[in-house]
Structures are given as C-alpha cells and as structure tokens.
Image: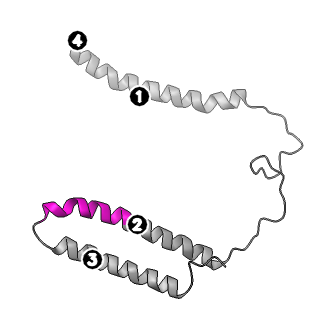
C-alpha cells in the first residue's frame, strides 16, 4: 500500500503542476478584454499623463553617490559574517583581512570626500 502511494504522489504533483500552469496561462486569455481602446498605443506611467520627454540627464554625482552607498552596503554584508565567525578561528588572519578591507574602504571614502562627491550641489 505504501509503495503505491510513493509511486502515485510524484505523478499527482507533476500533473497538478501542469494543470495549474495551464489554467494560469489560459484564464487571462479567456477573461481579458479584446477591444482596442483609444489609448492602447500610449505609454502608461502609473495612471498619470506623460509630461515632457523621457530623455532627462542626471548629473554624474548621483551615480557616484549610489556607488558609494553600494560599497558600504557590501561592507556591512561582508563584515557581519566575518565578525560572527572570528571566535571559531584560532588565528589572526581573518582579523587582518577585515582590517585591510576596512582600510581600503576608508581610503575610498576619503577620496570621495576629497572629490566632493557626497555634496548635493
């Protein structure tokens, strides 16, 4: 009895998955409206009418600000696991690696401050 159930369960899950996928693909085709409206070919942007052109240039400082944020975000993601694992190591090698990483990151922050990247002007 148990062997029959073990053979049937994977097939029933597979059949259920295929059936669910087929329903999810065909249901919107059956329920969606077919008519072509007056605004069908216009760009839709959150229900608001389009104002101006889409080609707007941003200053390069905004991108640098974002890159610095990502660098410090990666720093946090890197340091938290290192600090939690430091107790299990018997050597100073992980501490030195984290220190070198922090020094390089601090130098990049000093460089960004010197170039006035973090000033919103």
How far, Cα to Cα, is label 4 from label 1? Answer: 21 Å
* Part of the protein shown in magenta: 76-89
* Of pointers 1 and 3, the one earlier in the residue sequence: 1
What residue did someone put label 3 on?
99
What residue did someone put label 4 on?
1
Q: Residue at x 84, y 59 (%)?
A: 51
94, above or below 31, in the image: below
Which quarter shows the N terminus? top left
Query: Is the Cβ of the residue at disc 4 closer than 8 Å to that at disc 3?
Result: no
Instruction: Name the disc covering residue 74, or none.
Output: 2
How far, Cα to Cα, is label 2 from label 1? Answer: 40 Å
Q: Residue at x 57, y 84 (%)?
A: 116
Q: Residue at x 78, y 46 (%)?
A: 47
How many marks the image carries: the answer is 4
Closer to us: mark 2 or mark 4?
Answer: 2
| Front-lying residue, 5 or 97 | 97
């Amino acid at each position: 009895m148990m062997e029959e159930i073990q053979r049937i369960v994977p097939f029933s899950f597979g059949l259920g998955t295929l059936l669910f996928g087929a329903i999810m693909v065909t249901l919107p085709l059956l329920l969606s409206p077919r008519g072509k409206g007056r605004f069908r070919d216009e760009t839709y942007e959150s229900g608001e009418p389009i104002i101006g052109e889409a080609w707007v240039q941003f200053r390069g400082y905004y991108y640098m600000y974002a890159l610095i944020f990502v660098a410090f975000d990666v720093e946090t993601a890197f340091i938290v696991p290192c600090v939690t694992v430091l107790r299990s190591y018997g050597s100073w090698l992980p501490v030195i690696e984290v220190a070198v990483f922090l020094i390089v990151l601090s130098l990049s922050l000093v460089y960004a401050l010197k170039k006035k990247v973090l000033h919103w002007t």
